[in-house]
Image: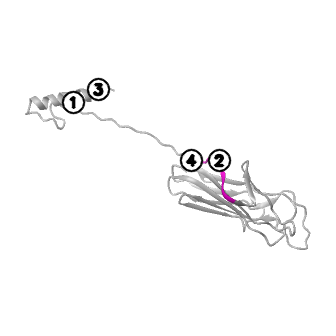
Amino acid sequence: MTRLRLLLVSLPALASTALFSAGVQADGDGPGSASAQFTVTGQAPKVCALPSPQATGSATNATFAGNAVNITQFIDSSNARVVASNLSLQYPSTLCNYNATLSIKSTNGGLVSTDAGSVASAGAFLQNVPYTIQAVWGPVSLMLDTNNASKGSAVLASTQTNGAISGNLELHFAVAGSTLPVPQGTYQDTILIKIGAQM
């Protein structure tokens, strides 16, 4: 506060000196002048924000509610084969203010039954239903693909943002129709989304 007051008081003095004494220079730190400086600093720590998702666009054979995707017709009742489904989610105004990592993880490596009975040795059945998730976040694109995963094995996909990034994070979930039948049961997987540090 003292330096600011000194500067304000000094300006009229400089003006009067310039008017009545042509021999004294007003520019620079000469006679009748004074100067001061100060530094302003602020620290911006690492910040990431991932708001709650919402369903966007059109969905096929799937709904989103309560932080869960529900496939409304998982199999065809006439042949027990998987029916194709897809759904898009958006995490609005997602941001990281530094070079961060975008990660998507499938804990089961596909949709795995939690209560299917034993499968007879005769005939082939699909017991691990694969799916894909395409993530798009500004210029960043990432694909999680469980098609070649082992049953019950986690699958992780990650990429760097290459700098600070802000914008809607879009996820496109898709299950393809199958050529093999699926045993009776409830099939599920847990998907983890993380931005910032490596998962």
**Dot 1 or dot 3, earlier in sequence:** 3
Mark 1 = which residue?
Answer: 11
Mark 3 = which residue?
Answer: 5
**Dot 1 or dot 4, earlier in sequence:** 1
Kindly indicate the quadrant of the structure image that contains residue 146.
bottom right
- Going 9% across and 29% down the picture, which residue do you hit? 20
**Dot 3 or dot 4, earlier in sequence:** 3
Give the number of the disc on residue 143. Answer: none
User: On screen, 199 above or below 42?
Assistant: below
Between marks 2 and 4, how big is the CA–CA gap? Answer: 13 Å
Give the number of the disc on residue 48. Answer: 4
User: On screen, 117 above or below 39?
Assistant: below
Mark 2 = which residue?
Answer: 52
Mark 4: few, some, or many residues within 10 Å (few <14, many ≥20)? some
- Going 13% across and 35% down the picture, which residue do you hit? 25
Q: What segment is highlighted magenta in the picture?
A: 48-58
Which three-letter amino acid code belongs to the residue tagged 4?
Cys
Which three-letter amino acid code belongs to the residue tagged 1?
Leu
Between marks 2 and 1, how big is the CA–CA gap? Answer: 56 Å
Q: Secondary structure at mark 3?
A: helix
x and y percent of residue 125 in the render?
85, 69
